[in-house]
Every structure is written in structure tokens, then in C-alpha cells.
């Protein structure tokens, strides 16, 4: 047992899922990734990751939640990879090990960065458990090595992402936005959606986030935000899952300000103009039977944070 009285007995971290308010993609680069210009927003659906001391060199994970069986439970789990990377880069010469417990609510392979969120939470939880004293920049750098969305999951709020989506800076955003998330029965693999995107005519216009979207966020203008939402991956996701077009149509008919597929999908996010409208729309969409589950959420919320 590596724990001493000075070390934390256990550390718990809560981490949100994300939606992309804008996702502009360039063509595939030689490294296999696409250059992106994206605006992330963290929303109030959370995974929780607990880190407990384990014997030297022991890294394990247990996953709980409705979709737990779809999450790898060994060293291929991205949260375990995060812990191992942290131990290798910043824990040299120390007998580190960790037992991770993940309580999942963010949909698996849903376009909401669920895996990246768990990696971000594991980085933060283990750095505190092991008393590694890392700077936020060091955590962001480790995050980028694990996955393109991990730095944003550490940061949270509303942020502009460039490069692979891993270079993140906060953007000004006023007020809160009320969203309805519709979770699909089926998963969509991000690499497959990008591969489908590569077969389609490239999007027109420059690789940049619409100025109207940034202005809408600064002004807290829900209607203008609705008009500016954009996702270059949406046609590819609909091509692979045509039923997503029906879901988007239902939201439009039932009064959503706007709707779009989150990231690579298949989660669909509908913008509404109040909390009451979000609750009402979530009930209506739930009744259609077009999705596995519906949840009203709010954004922005902070990124990975320690729980007392
Ligand atoms: O970085 P991450 O492992 O989350 O990315 C998953 C996959 O998504 C990559 O392997 C790649 O196929 C695709 N991707 C991409 N361009 C990006 C981000 C992700 O092609 N900017």
C-alpha cells in the first residue's frame, strides 16, 4: 500500500460532456487528423471519476452506468491510459498505481467527448492523489497527447478549438443556454464519420468559426446563436445514420430554436429559449420513440473539477 497519512486517501473529479456549437473541418492531413476550427461548450451532463491508491505499477478501472458494458475495462480504457501516461512522464522513481472508478452518464461514442472527459478527469484526479503539483499547462499538454478533445474537457466553459481541436482558448460568452440532448440507440465512431466526410464534397468557405456565432455568444443572443450553429460533419453523420435527419426535423417542428448533431454524432442537441421550453421539448421528443433517452441540460459549465 503506497498511501501515507500525508497523501489523499481517494480523490473524486466531476467532468462534463461537450457539444460543438460550430465545427468547421478542413481535409485530412498527412498525420490522419483534420484541421478544425470549432467552438466547444461544456454542458451539464457529467461523468465522475474516483482515484484510489493501488499497489506500485497497478492500474485498473471499474465502470458503472447504463452503458458501462460498452466501455473497455482494461489498459485500453482512455482513463487508464491517462493515469499511466501521467505516472510515466511526471512520476518517475515513485511507486505509483491507481484504482479508477468511473460513473458514466455522458453517452458512449455519442459525439460528446465521453472518453476524453474521463481521461481529463483521470489526469486531474491522479495528479492530486499522487501529489504531483502539475501546472494547468502541463495537464493540457498531457491531455492533447491522449485525444483531441481532452484539453477542452479540462478547461470547460465555452472555448475556441483549433489545430486538431486540441489548442483551446476560452471565448467570451454571456448567460446560459438551455439545450435538449437526444441520445441515439446506435453509436457512431468518430474515425468513420471523418472518413465519410472525406468522401463528400468539401465544405465551402474558409476554415474559421462564423463571426456571427462569436458575436451571438458575446451578446447572449439565443436566436442569433441558433442561426449561426454549424457542423461540417453533420452531412457525413446523416449519411451513415439517415434517421438522424428525422430527429432533427421533429425538433424543428416542435419549437426548437435550432438543432444540430453534436460533433461526430449521433447525439443531437436542440437549442431552446428557456428552461421551461427545454423541459417541454424534451418531453415531446421523448414521446417520439426516435431516441434512447432525452435530457435537458444547460451550458456552459466548468470543466473537470475536484469534488470535496
Ligand atoms: O484524438 P481522438 O483520439 O479523440 O480522435 C479520434 C479520431 O477522430 C482520430 O483517430 C481521427 O480519425 C479523428 N479525428 C480527426 N481529426 C480531428 C480529431 C479527430 O480526423 N481533428
Image (spheres, rainbow, N blue to C red):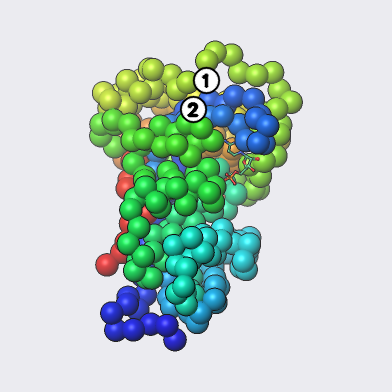
Question: What number of labels is visible?
Answer: 2
* Disc on res. 89: none
- The location of residue 98, given as percent across then percent down, is 48, 73
Q: Horizontal placement of 208 versus 75: left or right?
A: left
Pointers 1 and 2 in contact (C-beta within 8 Å): yes
Say whether mark 1 is within 8 Å of ligand 1. no
Visible residue check, residue 185: yes
Q: Horizontal placement of 301 versus 109: left or right?
A: left
For label 1, the residue is: 207
* Disc on res. 37: 2
* Residue lying at the far front of the rendered structure: 93
Q: Earlier in the sequence, mark 1 or mark 2?
A: 2
Q: Determine the residue positioned at 53% across, 29% down.
A: 36
Q: Determine the residue positioned at 71% across, 22% down.
A: 200
Which is nearer the eye, 135 or 159?
135
Which is nearer the eye, 255 or 236?
236
User: Residue 129's image quarter?
Assistant: bottom left
Dot 1 falls on a residue whose secondary structure is loop
Amino acid at each position: 500500500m503506497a498511501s501515507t497519512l500525508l497523501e489523499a486517501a481517494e480523490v473524486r473529479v466531476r467532468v462534463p460532456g461537450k457539444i460543438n456549437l460550430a465545427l468547421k473541418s478542413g481535409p485530412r492531413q498527412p498525420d490522419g487528423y483534420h484541421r478544425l476550427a470549432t467552438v466547444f461548450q461544456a454542458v451539464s451532463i457529467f461523468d465522475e471519476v474516483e482515484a484510489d491508491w493501488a499497489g506500485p505499477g497497478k492500474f485498473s478501472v471499474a465502470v458503472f452506468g447504463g452503458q458501462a458494458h460498452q466501455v473497455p475495462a482494461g489498459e485500453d480504457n482512455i482513463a487508464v491510459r491517462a493515469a499511466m501516461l501521467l505516472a510515466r512522464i511526471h512520476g518517475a522513481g515513485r511507486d505509483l498505481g491507481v484504482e479508477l472508478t468511473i460513473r458514466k452518464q455522458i453517452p458512449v461514442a455519442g459525439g460528446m467527448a465521453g472518453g476524453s472527459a474521463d481521461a481529463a478527469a483521470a489526469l486531474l484526479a491522479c495528479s492530486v492523489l499522487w501529489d504531483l503539483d502539475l501546472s494547468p499547462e502541463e495537464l493540457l499538454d498531457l491531455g492533447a497527447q491522449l485525444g483531441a478533445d481532452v484539453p477542452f474537457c479540462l478547461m470547460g466553459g465555452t472555448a475556441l478549438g483549433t489545430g486538431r481541436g486540441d489548442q483551446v482558448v476560452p471565448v467570451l460568452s454571456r448567460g446560459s443556454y438551455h439545450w435538449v440532448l437526444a441520445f441515439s440507440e446506435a453509436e457512431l465512431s468518430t474515425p468513420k464519420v471523418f472518413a465519410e466526410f472525406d468522401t463528400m464534397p468539401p465544405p465551402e468557405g474558409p476554415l474559421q468559426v462564423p463571426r456571427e456565432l462569436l458575436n451571438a455568444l458575446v451578446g447572449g443572443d439565443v436566436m442569433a446563436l441558433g442561426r449561426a450553429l454549424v457542423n461540417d460533419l453533420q452531412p457525413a453523420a446523416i449519411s451513415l445514420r439517415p434517421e438522424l435527419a428525422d430527429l432533427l426535423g421533429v425538433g424543428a417542428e416542435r419549437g426548437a430554436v435550432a438543432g444540430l448533431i453534436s460533433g461526430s454524432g449521433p447525439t443531437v442537441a436542440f437549442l431552446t429559449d428557456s428552461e421551461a421550453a427545454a423541459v417541454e421539448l424534451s418531453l415531446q421528443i421523448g414521446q417520439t420513440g426516435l431516441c434512447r433517452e432525452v435530457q435537458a441540460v444547460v451550458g456552459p459549465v466548468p470543466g473537470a473539477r475536484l469534488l470535496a
